[in-house]
Amino acid sequence: MTSTRQQWQTNLVSLKTIAYKEIRRFLRIWQQTLLPPAITMTLYLIIFGSLIGARIGEMGGHSYIEFIVPGVIMIAVITNSYANVVSSFFSAKFQRFIEEILVSPTPNLVILLGYLAGGFARGLLVGAIVLAISLLFTELRIHNPWITASIVLLTSLLFALGGFINAIFARTYDDISIIPTFVLTPLTYLGGVFYSIHLLPPFWQKVSLINPILYLVNAFRYGILGHSDINIGIAYTVALAFIALLGSIAMLLLRLGTGLRS
């Protein structure tokens, strides 16, 4: 019993140490991790929300800038949760200090959770910054706080897992930019951030349903505005299913040492 308790305490210290290192890392270089996405999202709100949105009018019963704010926040959460983990874990591989953690008694789950904590924290912090900026452009009343909070937490966790897996397979720094450039960016822009899928022809509406980001964006939009193009229950199912899938893959890759052991 004492041995088990000591093991739990040791694992907790390990988790806190890795998480603290990861959070302190992106806070130390906030000019590179927090400021650029805040500026980028502000430009989205100015150009698409204020300038173009004034000509578009309403969408889904809301002003256009209100309609796109949840999607813009989700872009920030997705990209930053992903970017933090993929860059940090790949750096650990590249500099070879990940081997010191792997040969220690630290369980794989603790290693995974520690790195995810950094992506989780950065994604949520940038999302909060973008939310604060958006309040300068429009007034928001949260329709359902529980759905809003739970979806943003699940989204951050999901894409932090994606960044971790990308980092495991990456061999060069160029490899960590392939998925964000050729997969995440197209899926995000086609995920209903700037438009309702009801504007699309029936065929393309069905094609859009393949995109998992569509479910996350719409569920988050429902939490804030009370409007969604898809069923909220399905959105939670998609999010939890992908988290379970990517979490299982990440744990398997750590156990096998894929891309980690010479």
Image (cartoon, rainbow, N blue to C red):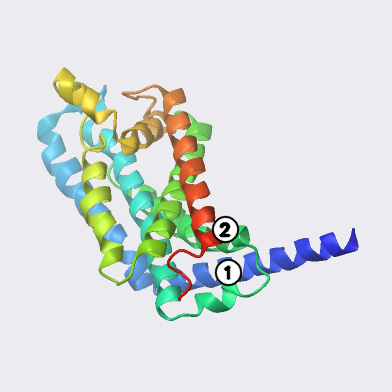
Image: 181 above or below 143:
below
* Extreme-right residue of the structure: 1
Residue extending furthest toward the top: 202
**Residue 203 seen in the current view:** yes
Q: Secondary structure at mark 1?
A: helix
Mark number, residue 30? none
Q: Residues within 10 Å of mark 1 (few under 14, many from 20)?
A: many
Residue drawn at (12%, 43%), measured in percent from left and top?
51
Q: Quadrant of the C terminus?
A: bottom left
Amino acid marked by disc 1: Ile
| Amino acid on which the number 2 mark rests in the picture | Leu
User: Residue 188's spot in the image, x, y percent?
Assistant: 26, 43
Which badge, 1 or 2, comes first in the chain's sequence? 1
At which x and y percent is residue 177? 26, 62
Foreground residue, 246 or 157? 246
Instruction: Write the residue at 39% across / 70% down.
Output: 30
| Residue 28 visible somewhere in the drawing | no
Residue carrying label 1: 18
- Pointer 1 with pointer 2, Cβ within 8 A: yes
Could you tell me residue 101's position as x and y percent?
58, 74
